[in-house]
Image (spheres, grey):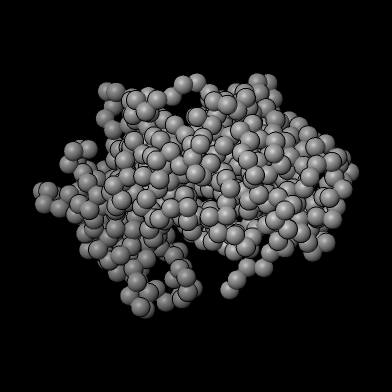
């Protein structure tokens, strides 16, 4: 199984995995070798799920559909990824905001989403 | 490691645009072939002279093969690079090196798209990668919106400043008969335009048009015998920093920082030497980012720079003098049109001709601020 399939298997179990290099640099998306060095000894670990909003956009839709957000999250471990923050509005979502990850398994494919820190799970 | 480039030893000998705006009833290949043949005619050359093809088409991933077949030639070298709208700057780099080495003698670089009259939407099969796609960012628009939002957050850049990029482009377009969007445009129009993916509204987005473009490149000794005065290629460099914006180490700084520095070093020029810059303005934030990254103003000062009127007609740095992708044309991969406007300014053939243009910069952008490539063209006086 390749790293991507391994990551997706974990996600389906509700876990957010990252890889790290021997130097401790966190990596996402999962790879067969460390970016930049080609170093092959990558270690899987379970991410804290905590991060902050690096940037965000609200994609507008034809009313009455509500706009939805697309964000780049910087995880506390250092890696970045694209996602969506649930339970927020354009007024309550901002760059620099602390968020925490959860896996939504209600759809066809499990999806990694975030909610603001402090919101009830 | 410094670059090696045959400065001024190859040149653009011919150029043409065709079907800019709307070209109903034409296929992309027809438009491309027309522009290619017109560029050869402009150079005083024929198809028989062409031994290398560099081509992109909106949806044909075998475009190099299709184009050779369509023209009925058997090129010694065919390049169908897909770095996005910057591909043509890379084409110039590889053509210059192959020409200098004697591997080829005459390169035809061409592009054409009927995306407006064939459907009116951005005609590409390229989309977000599998990590980003589940979150449905509009491709490619939301990626640029994420860059703009970050730039606004870090540097205080405003929507008004971004709108001034669109207003400058429109002002240039209004006196360019080839430009597609020449109607009046006000700050109020821009600020009240329909929001698409915050903070980018429709007024921040490039046009969707048809259009084709082509250039002919050959070695300088031969270019001197062509029909038009050669436009020497002084430098060309491409930078590849990421594909998805989620993986950008710093979303307010693009690979234009690298491509511009390298291309200018090859050419032996600095930003102060550039008489006009043609920057791939797929969105208004692009122009701001590239002005900063290419060194025309400090990082973070792109907003105030464009708001000062510096890039508009009468400003200190004429940018996108044809109206750019925002107001002249944007058939999907604009890079070659930026190159042609730069070459026209050097030749003295531009619709909005500037005085004494000796050094012109053309900058291409591909993907989602992913591929950045810069070409420096000069007049014969710069050799």
With respect to residue B180, does B332 lie above or below?
Answer: below
Q: Position of residue A27 (x, y in %)?
A: 37, 66
Quadrant hosting residue B278: top right
Q: Position of residue B79 (x, y in %)?
A: 71, 51
Apparent side of residue B367 relative to residue B42 in the rendered image (left or right): left
Quadrant hosting residue B47: top right
Q: Is residue B129 visible?
A: no
Q: Is residue B269 visible?
A: yes
With respect to residue B172, does A103 lie above or below?
Answer: below
The residue that appears at 47% across and 74% down in the rendered structure is A37
Q: Position of residue A79 (x, y in %)?
A: 33, 62
The residue that appears at 47% across and 49% down in the rendered structure is B291
Q: Nearer the viewer, residue B370 or A10?
A: B370
Locate the C terminus of chain B and report the quarter of the image it occupies.
bottom right
Q: Nearer the viewer, residue B140 or B252?
A: B252
Apparent side of residue B18 relative to residue B331 in the rendered image (left or right): right
């Amino acid at each position: 199984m390749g790293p991507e399939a391994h990551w997706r298997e974990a996600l389906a179990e509700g876990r957010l995995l990252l890889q790290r290099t021997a130097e401790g640099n966190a990596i996402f998306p999962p790879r067969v070798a460390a970016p930049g060095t080609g170093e092959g000894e990558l270690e899987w670990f379970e991410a804290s799920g905590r991060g902050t909003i690096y940037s965000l956009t609200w994609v507008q839709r034809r009313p009455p559909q509500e706009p939805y957000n697309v964000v780049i999250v910087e995880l506390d471990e250092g890696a970045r990824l694209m996602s969506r923050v649930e339970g927020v509005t354009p007024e309550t979502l901002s760059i620099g905001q602390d968020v925490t990850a959860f896996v939504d398994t209600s759809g066809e494919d499990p999806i990694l989403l975030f909610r603001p820190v402090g919101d009830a799970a | 490691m410094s670059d090696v480039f045959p400065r001024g030893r190859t040149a653009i000998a011919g150029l043409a645009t065709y079907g800019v705006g709307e070209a109903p009833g034409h296929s992309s290949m027809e438009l491309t072939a027309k522009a290619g043949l017109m560029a050869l005619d402009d150079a005083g050359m024929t198809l028989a002279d062409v031994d290398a093809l560099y081509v992109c088409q909106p949806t044909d991933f075998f475009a190099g093969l299709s184009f050779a077949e369509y023209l009925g030639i058997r090129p010694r070298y065919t390049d169908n690079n897909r770095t996005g709208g910057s591909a043509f700057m890379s084409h110039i780099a590889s053509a210059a090196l192959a020409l200098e080495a004697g591997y080829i003698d005459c390169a035809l670089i061409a592009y054409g798209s009927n995306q407006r009259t064939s459907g009116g939407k951005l005609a590409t099969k390229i989309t977000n990668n599998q990590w980003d796609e589940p979150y449905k960012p509009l491709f490619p628009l939301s990626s640029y919106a994420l860059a703009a939002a970050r730039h606004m957050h870090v540097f205080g850049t405003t929507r008004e400043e971004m709108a001034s990029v669109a207003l400058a482009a429109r002002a240039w377009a209004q006196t360019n008969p080839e430009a597609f969007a020449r109607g009046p445009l006000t700050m109020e129009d821009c600020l009240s335009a329909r929001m698409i993916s915050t903070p980018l509204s429709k007024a921040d987005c490039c046009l969707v048009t048809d259009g084709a473009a082509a250039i002919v490149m050959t070695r300088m000794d031969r270019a001197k015998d062509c029909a038009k005065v050669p436009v020497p290629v002084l430098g060309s460099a491409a930078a590849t920093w990421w594909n998805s914006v989620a993986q950008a180490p710093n979303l307010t700084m693009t690979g234009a920082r690298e491509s511009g520095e390298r291309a200018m070093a090859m050419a032996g020029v600095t930003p102060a030497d550039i008489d006009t810059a043609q920057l791939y303005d797929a969105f208004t934030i692009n122009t701001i980012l590239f002005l900063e990254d290419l060194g025309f103003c400090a990082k973070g000062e792109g907003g105030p720079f464009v708001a000062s009127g510096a890039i508009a007609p009468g400003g200190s740095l004429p940018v996108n003098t044809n109206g750019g992708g925002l107001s002249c044309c944007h058939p999907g991969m604009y890079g070659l049109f930026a190159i042609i406007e730069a070459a026209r300014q050097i030749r003295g053939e531009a619709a909005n001709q500037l005085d004494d243009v000796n050094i012109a910069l053309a900058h291409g952008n591909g993907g989602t601020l992913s591929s950045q490539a810069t070409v420096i063209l000069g007049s014969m006086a710069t050799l």
